Amino acid sequence: MTFVALKRIRHHWFSPQLWLRRVVLWGGAICVGSIAIVFAMGADQANILLHRMVAYSPYLPLVVTPAGLALAVYVTRRLFPGAEGSGIPQVIAALQIQEDKLRGSVLSLRIALGKIVVTLFALLVGAAVGREGPTVQIGASVMHALGRFVRFSRQETEKGLILAGGAAGVAAAFNTPLAGIVFAIEEMSRSFEERTSGTILTAVIIAGITSLAVIGDYPYFGHTAAVLPLDIAWIAVIVCGAGGGLAGGIFSRLIIASSTGLPWKIGDLKRNRPILFAAACGLVLAVLGLLSGSTTYGTGYHEARSVLEGDGQVPALYGVLKLLATAVSYASGVPGGLFSPSLAVGAGFGANISEIMPYAPAGAVVLLGMAGYFAGVVQAPITSFVIVIEMTDNHQLALPLMATALVAAGTSRLICPTPIYKALSEGFLSRTKSTKASEASGKAAGKVPAGTTGETQVKPPAA
């Protein structure tokens, strides 16, 4: 063994700095897993309280939801700017921001706290949002803060820790470690770098172990043993793939439009009166809740599980109504994700398709619908079928789910060429650059040349 090899071994196993970094990474992963568990419990309690309110009177949301969404948007804009929306676009944007100060505008412990508090409040008042996307931003924020504390290298901070935190968030939120890894590679980074792979895997494993230790090994949406015979039933793959991709692409266009600028007076209302716009969105959500028998509120977790296991009743138009409720919730500007609501929409569409395909097992078609619509929304086919397999503990449908996700992602790209999270992250990057340019212009405006009296006013970027 050469002297160089011995030196590397000694550095790897006995370097205090490396051990400090490992301890910080492991501790951060445990923190992310623990926060995800508490967040999930809070979301469940918010859902329980919401349905108690609806059980008392289904008309209460007509008042509570508009007022609640208006308050949530006000608090987000005043106290937690950068916490709005899903959270995944902010993490993707953070990976491309070089300046540490600007990165802190989308990743910080303050934003993580706001994400938890305001998302839970939004769920309590009836918003159709998920907690998985917010958990990604929370995980990335925790890891980013720890990286700054111990002064990690630039490469590890930008790629390793941020990606690891986001991946750990997905793994702990859904109890799906493999999906966390795949999502970090396929969606958040759109690449795989050898230097960050070990960091991601370590964070996902530790966060997953934390989740397993506290709440055990469970399939997120229950278990189904449904299989798809290799015969005419495979038509469901084409229908769920093409239909899910079409619906997912349309939904993505709606979300991107709500972020970049809605048309006509609706867009003017959102830009100029965002609190009033949020209240109007809350009223629409309450109406959708009445039409759906109060099934469109919240994450959609219980409705999707009941559809999959065949022991519950949802309206025939549940998929459409939940899609609209999710789009309106996101457009309002409250913090909240798209994962669980999208899977619930897919379950509703799958149930509709199963009714016109009696030759295919209903449970299998529902799973195909979930994978197809989710892949159509995020355009990440590998993540889509992996996350459905892990959440339902059904490996017999691996090949049909793969095929459905690929067809859906391809169909969605015809409708929405730019993936939703990429488009939204570009919006955050643009606003961040505008903020930086405004600050630079403000400093320059303060240096007025001699003999002039000009004054420059810098408008802040649109929220």
Image (cartoon, rainbow, N blue to C red):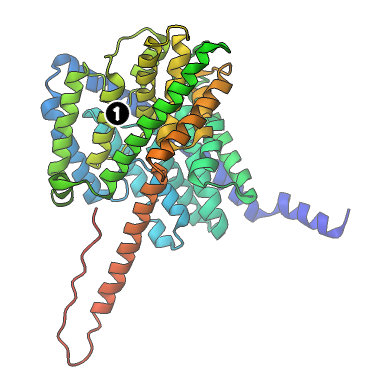
Residue extending furthest toward the right:
1
Q: Is residue 16 visible?
A: yes
Residue 221's place in the image compared with 129, above or below, is above
Nearest the viewer among 262 and 12 is 262
Judge left or right: residue 260 versus residue 408: left
Report the side of 388 relative to 83 (left or right).
Answer: right
Q: Quadrant of residue 243?
A: top left
Picture coordinates of residue 174, whole percent (x, y): 46, 28
Q: Which residue is mark 1?
A: 323
Q: Position of residue 71 (x, y in %)?
A: 17, 40
At x 13% / y 48%, what residue is drawn? Answer: 273
Q: Quadrant of residue 42?
A: top left
Residue sitting nearer the eye, 352 or 85: 352
**Residue appearing at x 12%, y 26% in the figure:** 62
Please tell me which residue is depicted at 17% across the width and 20% down the height of the picture: 290
x%, y% of residue 209? 56, 29
Secondary structure of residue under mark 1:
helix
**On screen, residue 36 above or below 367:** below
Q: Closer to the camera, 355 or 287?
A: 355
